[in-house]
Image: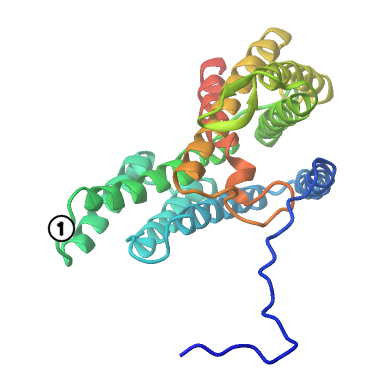
Amino acid sequence: MAFAPPAGMSEPESAEPTKPSKRQAFYRRLISTLVLAAFFAFAYWYQRDWFFFLIVAVMSFAALVEYTQLFPKMGFRRFRAQNYGVTLAYLFFLFAPAFGFEAAWISERDGLAVAVLVTLVVLDRLRNPIEGFRTLQEIAATVFGFIYCVLLFCFVGKTLMLELPDTQGKSSAPFYVLYLIVVTKFTDIGAYSIGSVFGRDKMIPHISPGKTWQGFAGAIVVAVAASFVCTMLFGEKIPLITPVHAALLAVLIALVAVLGDLAESIVKRSLESKDSGQLMPGIGGMLDLIDSVIFTGPLFYVYLLILQ
């Protein structure tokens, strides 16, 4: 039975959220970027290994939580307890050697973590009837989330634990990570700013309508500039990155960073979501923040291993 509103009163219209203008979006992104820059500046001033490890762990876990929440809340088994439990254990054993806990099997933690997660998910899935291909989709989505948000991003943590001395023999791994973050994020800034002003030719419109070839070129140019600025500022702290490596790394990081951004676009468009979260105005969630580093981290780690 329907009830009409009292005379003289009309039902409130559902107001759709107003989309911010380009200027508003720019200022929101700028403020969030400045806050993040201040936070990381404090981290490098504080210079404590445990604090760097904590940052990596929190960012990785937060990204996984956001990834899990992108899926429909009802009707899709996300196996959160198994995924979160394996992630916490993995993060503990990832940084355990830095605090004196040594064991031969720790070097195999990546494969072991995936094996344990798959085992736990399959055991849980035995309790319910098979639902065709969807059953595999649920398992695959869970394992992919762990690999994407945790295993790949934690190459940043692995870089922090490399023996990378500066010119005076002191450990300078955090400055190599700072180089990675600066070049990667300036790649994003270059793509966004140049693409916003000069972007005309769509790059991959079926994946990310906003990406243009002009923005892609801007990403590479700004990445190269940021790389050389970093080598001038941190020269004695990152001696492995010579001018030749600075140029080569900048191009590689820029290419892979754009790929990382597109990878997250695939995830979000597949799940019909604009942002992974609302943690940072103008940027989105934690997954939006680290999407490019998820891909540049492994590249940089292997590059440094080759240079050592």
Query: Residue 13 versus residue 64: which sits nearer the camera?
Result: 13
Q: Quadrant of the N terminus?
A: bottom left
Q: Write the residue at 57% across / 37% down.
A: 156
Q: Residues within 10 Å of mark 1 (few under 14, many from 20)?
A: few
Query: Residue 158 versus residue 211: which sits nearer the camera?
Result: 211
Q: Write the residue at 70% across / 20% down.
A: 200
Task: Tell me the amino acid under the disc marked 1.
Answer: Ile
Q: State left or right for residue 34 relative to residue 284.
A: right
Q: State left or right for residue 204 relative to residue 80.
A: right
The answer to whether 308 is drawn above or below residue 142 in the figure is: above
* Quarter holding residue 40: top right
Q: Where residue 292 sits: x, y (%)?
A: 59, 34
Q: Where residue 280 sits: x, y (%)?
A: 71, 53
Q: Where residue 24 sits: x, y (%)?
A: 83, 47
Q: Which residue is mark 1?
A: 130
Q: State left or right for residue 52 relative to residue 229.
A: left
Q: Where residue 246 sits: x, y (%)?
A: 70, 14
Residue lying at the far front in this picture: please name it: 7
Q: Quadrant of the C terminus?
A: top right
Q: State left or right for residue 237 relative to residue 154.
A: right
Q: Disc 1 on helix, strand or loop?
A: loop
Query: Residue 123 versus residue 288: which sits nearer the camera?
Result: 288
Query: Residue 4 versus residue 16: which sits nearer the camera?
Result: 4
